[in-house]
Image (cartoon, rainbow, N blue to C red):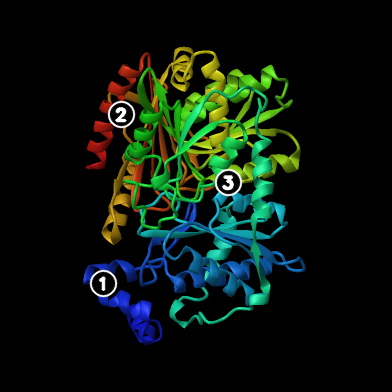
Amino acid sequence: MTLKNWERIAKDYPWIQDGLNSMSDHDKQDAFYKSLEFGTAGMRGLLGVGPNRMNLLTVAKANLGFGKYLVEEFEGQELKIAIAYDNRHMSKEFADISARILSTFGIQSYVFENLRPTPELSFAVRELSCIGGIVITASHNPKEYNGYKVYDETGCQLIDSKIAKVIANINENPDETLIDLNVGDTSLIHTIGEDMDHKYLEALKGIQLRPNDEKDLTIVFTSQHGTSYPLVPNLLESCGYKVIVVEEQSSFDPDFSNTKTPNPEELESYDLAIEYAIKYNADIVLSCDPDADRMGIVVNHEGSFEYLTGNQGGSILQEYIYSSRNELNKMPERPIMFNTVVTSDLGDKIAKKYGITVEKTLTGFKYIGTKIQEHNTKGDYEFVFGYEESYGYLLADFARDKDAPQACLMVAEAANFYKKEKRTLVDVLNGLYAEHGAHVEKQVAITRAGETGLQEIQNILKTFREDSPATLGGINVLMVDDFLTSKRSTGEDLDFPQSNVLKFYLEDGSWIAIRPSGTEPKCKFYYCVIGKTTELANEKFETLKNDVNRIAKI
């Protein structure tokens, strides 16, 4: 029936007719069997025709739900939101339809004049005293994707309880083909210009711990065709660093033509940047994903270029930040750090060494942003760091989402500081391993697209949940956290929102977590493996991975 509704209106929208004409039967089955859902980072999917695709009608439908939510939640207040978008296909069009749909509720939209980083949107929400925000982006996904993320009045992505209200409103309009796209009061739509860039840039400069140190660092930087250019190079250069931009990847190309992947989690995304680094003998390579919330690092160490994982980058940043704060008397009285249940334990050990409270959240920076707000309101702890294993970092809470520009500046400062001591960031990491034990963190993801793929992923979680293994890789399982039932296998309740995640704690201090992705058709397996040396930890990881794959039948 849904397909017939789209066919009915195809004559009014050439993009629908063209899309339907180009789709195979398999494509239609996947595009029409369900509607796009909100995951850990909002709504994200393939561009195309149908309710299970990102297009003008599905984005309009989402805005009808968000608009009603805003009107109900902020009755009697000034209704205004901020909107940003990235370089992807249809991003500007989705931002435009979002503003026009929201105007039908009497909501004013402040839309960036062109593409901007996701963390700058979070900053703008706070700076403009908005009641919410929207970012049109698919983050690090391939070019075929786009997405829609919604923010609350603190600049934090909406958490589950708030999203549930938005979804309930969205579901009141089950047939998106009945939505009129030719609506909107343009008098309620305003432009955000360079003034916000200047304010954000000054806030970024303010995170420096050693702003007056002499700079002796060469950085190769790539924006992966995304929104971090020219802001991040301008930021680094204004702070005294020598920056060499990968020019081929600095254009706002929605096809990502000059990068193998825009995802800094994937090693091949750095290939061209490393060619630059070799040519100019750079100290480090910094890479941001297209919407500039994630950042990856490659280090020139003893003549070779070594990649750092998100966990490793987070551990090094913490060691530098905490030791520097102590040295410079900039450590607050009651500091707190946030990370997630699938983030390495090495960061926890570093934080505790410096007397910093650690609090864990579910995966998704919205949970970290919410925790920051909670403790700010209580006045009991002061935020000093937040991070996820997936290359997301936050150092100062003028934004409430992961902030790659912040991370780039602090990594540069740390690398510059340690270079004066004749150490690279890899040397610092090895020192942390010597102190706390070698930690090898790996993520293994399987992709299973479509309806059958979704069922296969659900079956994997069901297998591990209903027939929980007593050993993994020959190591005893001490206990299991089930975040769906909010129970630990030893009987304690877990104080987390419900989520389809399992975490297995092993006798040797290692752990394994399993969760379906909230934004992609993937099942992710997270490993934190501890050994006396990295070689032994890697060997242990291979054994654990093989056993997990055997149980999961993958």
Position in image of residue 524 (x %, y %): 36, 43
Q: What residue type is labelled 2?
A: Leu
Quadrant of the drawing holding the C terminus: top left
Amino acid beneath label 1: Met
Q: Quadrant of residue 116?
A: bottom right
What is the distance, in whole Å, between disc 3 and disc 2 at their CAs? Answer: 35 Å
- Above or below, 421 relative to 81: above
Task: Work out whether residue 361 or residue 505 is closer to the camera in this orientation and state it.
Answer: 361
| Mark 3 crowdedness (10 Å alpha carbons): few <14, some 14-19, many ≥20 | many
SS category of the residue bearing label 2: strand
| Residue annotated with mark 1 | 23
Which amino acid type is shown beneath numbered disc 3?
Answer: Asp
Q: In this view, does 123 lie to the left or right of 76?
A: left
Q: Are marks 1 and 2 in contact (CB under 8 Å)?
A: no
Classify residue 83 by image quadrant.
bottom right
Identify the residue shown where x is 48% and y is 26%: 345
Q: In this view, does 284 lie above or below 268?
A: above
Q: Residue 401 carries which label?
A: 3
- Residue 169 appears in view: no
Give the residue displayed 61% in from the left and 59% down from the top.
133
**Number of marks present in the image shown:** 3
- The kind of secondary structure element at disc 1 is loop
> What residue is pinned by disc 2?
472
The residue drawn where x is 35% and y is 18% is: 534
